[in-house]
Amino acid sequence: MNLVFWLVLVVLVVLALKKKSQSVMPPESGTTPSAPPASAKEPAAETMVCCARCQIYLPASEAVHRGQQVYCCDAHADNS
Ligand SMILES: [Zn+2]
């Protein structure tokens, strides 16, 4: 009885380790070189906007809006 318990325990540990090693393995990359490889990792990619003054890209949530234009910071929004 004790031996069966240990056998089951060993099998469970081996299965858990196999699962872990599979999840650690990186997803297939290189099939689409133009697409960003991290797209699968990020659950919800935030919309990126471009500053109308310096053309830097930043998340829409961090952007400064002035009318129709979007800026990266208050200084760029006010100086235009
Ligand atoms: Zn800017």
Image (cartoon, rainbow, N blue to C red):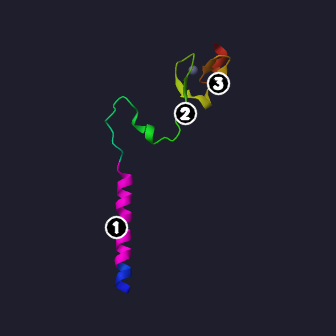
Residue 75 in the image, given as x and y percentages of width and height:
64, 20
Query: Which-is-in-front pick, marks 2 and 3?
Result: 2
Q: Is residue 39 above or below residue 68?
A: below
Amino acid type, callout 3: Val
Q: Is residue 13 left or right of residue 73?
A: left
Q: Is residue 77 left or right of residue 58?
A: right
Residue 23 counted in the magenta span: yes
Point out the frontmost of discs 3 and 1.
1
User: Which structural element holds mark 1?
Assistant: helix
Residue furthest left in the image: 30
In the rendering, which numbered label is found on residue 14? 1
Are the residues flagged by discs 3 and 1 in contact, CB closer than 8 Å?
no
Rendering quarter of residue 67: top right
Q: Which is more N-terminal, label 1 or label 3? A: 1
Q: Position of residue 27 (x, y in %)?
A: 36, 45
* Residue displayed at 39% across by 53% down: 23
- The magenta-colored residue range is 7-25
